[in-house]
Image (cartoon, rainbow, N blue to C red):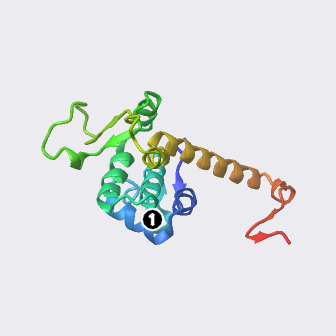
Amino acid sequence: MKLQLTSGDVCKVAGLVPNTLDRWAYAWMKGHAAGGEGHGRHRKYTLVETFALYAGARWRDEGAGWERIAGLVPFLARLPQERLEAEFEAGRTVPVLPHLFGALELPTGDTFGGMFVVPPDYPELPPAVRDLMQRVDLGRLWEATTRKVAEMVLDAQLSRQGSDYRKKAGRIRGLAKR
């Protein structure tokens, strides 16, 4: 069964508010989560779509311009999960987005409109630039997304089983323990 996440799940993982999620999904994910998989609060997202939105939110938090985010989110959302994992496994974690190429044909020969490259490793890069590159590294963001989703799925399974693990951990749903 294919994992499908609700809008609320995606908001938790990506750190987006619902109206931003709806705006981004409508503008950049047409034909994906914004259409055939439901509408409104019943919209469903795949793991890859959730990752695309998470990456877009992290890039926004780091000061990326809207044109970059508008290129990143739809590019990532259209990729098959196997392709993403293969690229990241090969160390290619920096996207080269389609708008950078204009009318040029990409050497990859695929229809996804972009490609991945290995991050540059120039010794003369200032530490602040190196830190930024690590924070927006898509391989790291993929790991963070999959970890957050796995924790959310486990949390849901345990709560369905009637486990009292939340009480043991000192958490009461929606309230801080006093």
* Above or below, 81 relative to 166: above
Question: Which residue is nearer to you in this view: 123 or 108?
Answer: 123
Q: In the image, residue 2 lies at what x, y percent? A: 52, 43
- Left or right of 92: which side holds 166? right
- The answer to whether residue 29 is visible is no
Q: Residue at x 37, y 58 (%)?
A: 64
Q: In the image, residue 135 lies at what x, y percent? A: 49, 48
Q: Classify mark 1: helix, strand or loop.
A: helix
Give the number of marks: 1
Quadrant of the snapshot with the N terminus: top right
Question: Which residue is nearer to you in this view: 96 or 78?
Answer: 96
Q: Quadrant of residue 70?
A: bottom left
* Above or below, 117 relative to 78: above
Q: Amino acid at mark 1?
A: Leu
Q: Residue at x 69, y 47 (%)?
A: 154
Q: Residue at x 38, y 32 (%)?
A: 118
Of all residues shown, which one is farthest toward the left? 103
Q: In the image, residue 10 lies at what x, y percent? A: 53, 58
**What crowding class fits label 1: few (fewer than 14 Cα within 10 Å), some (14-19), or many (20 or more)?**
some
Residue with the mark numbered 1: 21
Q: In the image, residue 176 lies at what x, y percent? A: 78, 70
Q: Residue at x 78, y 51 (%)?
A: 161
Of all residues shown, which one is farthest toward the top? 90
- The answer to whether residue 108 is visible is yes
- Left or right of 84: which side holds 151? right
Quadrant of the snapshot with the C terminus: bottom right
